[in-house]
Image (cartoon, rainbow, N blue to C red):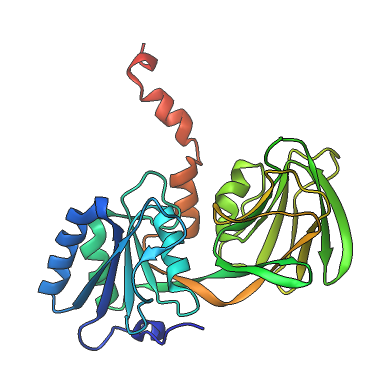
Amino acid sequence: MTHASRLRSQQPPSGPLSIVIVGSVAVGLEADRLSGLLTARGHEVRRVVQEAADRSAVAAPEPPAAADLVVVLGGDGSILRSARWMGYAQVPALGINLGRLGFLADTPRQDAAAAVAEVEAGRFRLVDHMMFECEVVRGGGVIHRDLGLNETSLLAGPPFTMIEIDLLVDGEPATTYRADGLIVSTPVGSTAYNLSAGGPIIRKDMDAFVFTPLNPHTLTNRTVVDSAARRYELRVPQPNVGSACLVDGRVLTPLAPGDAVRVRRAEPRFTLVEGGGHGYYRTLREKLAWGGGLRAAERSRPEAAG
């Protein structure tokens, strides 16, 4: 379910916007500055404080059910926390990058007010990103359920020996991974943990899951990309003492023998507000230094000039 924000028509909004600014205590000065600018433009502004030390939640009584726009101050971690906080009532989000890399929060802080002005003028587009539901089944019952944006990870953990993970697709056995773990990533999460593990980059507006094993024992166990319309189940017959299931980098639960982890596409979709200058491949070029960026950076170093 998504909130019926006036921005979903992708037309210039009539009248002031209801805007929620989300950020940690550490970005309070930036939040106050932006709040003042937006209030001066006539918008209704509310501030929500994230607890940066707790990756599982945002310190707020309830999601922004009546908001038109959520402005997230921080990095991609702040975006993940905000997406989880909004849950099944997603509101279009504008990410203001106060971090380092920022695949999702890619609007520079100095452009924050200008980005909202572009929204006011209707010069923006909404890009939906697939979310997923993860369930952990034990003894025939669901013991944990969570909503995520980037990935579900099954990690072997201490004593750091490989574990076996059975993959079933629509109830049919597909393969058994003997590895240090398995990442089940969405396209938007493909540039996160999945990319670090050697997985492919998937265009973020596609509907697919990426299965990337971590250090597999069998070299033919390669990354697999499959449709998000399928139902996936991961079974762990004999986990290690420290094996765990994680959602977006947050431990959902330790794993017990025989646990099953179910992953499927969720009904809500996380929606990012993008301006005309923030194309998909431009983001990849800038963030991953494509197109000779690393060589150019190397040539620009003072010691390289001699």
Q: Nearer the viewer, residue 163 or 110?
A: 163
Q: Is residue 275 in sight in this rendering?
A: no
In the image, 48: left or right of 271? left
In the rendered image, the residue lying farthest to the left is 40
Is the residue 120 above or below the residue 29 in the image? below
Q: Residue at x 15, y 60 (%)?
A: 33
Q: Position of residue 293 (x, y in %)?
A: 45, 36
Q: Is residue 303 in sight in this rendering?
A: yes
Quadrant of res 81: bottom left
Q: Position of residue 251 (x, y in %)?
A: 57, 53
Quadrant of res 240: top right
Quadrant of res 187: bottom right
Q: Nearer the viewer, residue 52 or 1?
A: 52
Q: Number of marks in the image?
A: 0
In the rendered image, the residue lying farthest to the top is 306
Q: Nearer the viewer, residue 165 or 30?
A: 165
Is the residue 32 above or below the residue 194 in the image? below
Q: Residue at x 43, y 25 (%)?
A: 298
Q: Residue at x 79, y 46 (%)?
A: 222
In the image, 20: left or right of 56? left
If the image is split into quadrants, where does the C terminus sit?
top left
Q: Position of residue 246 (x, y in %)?
A: 61, 54
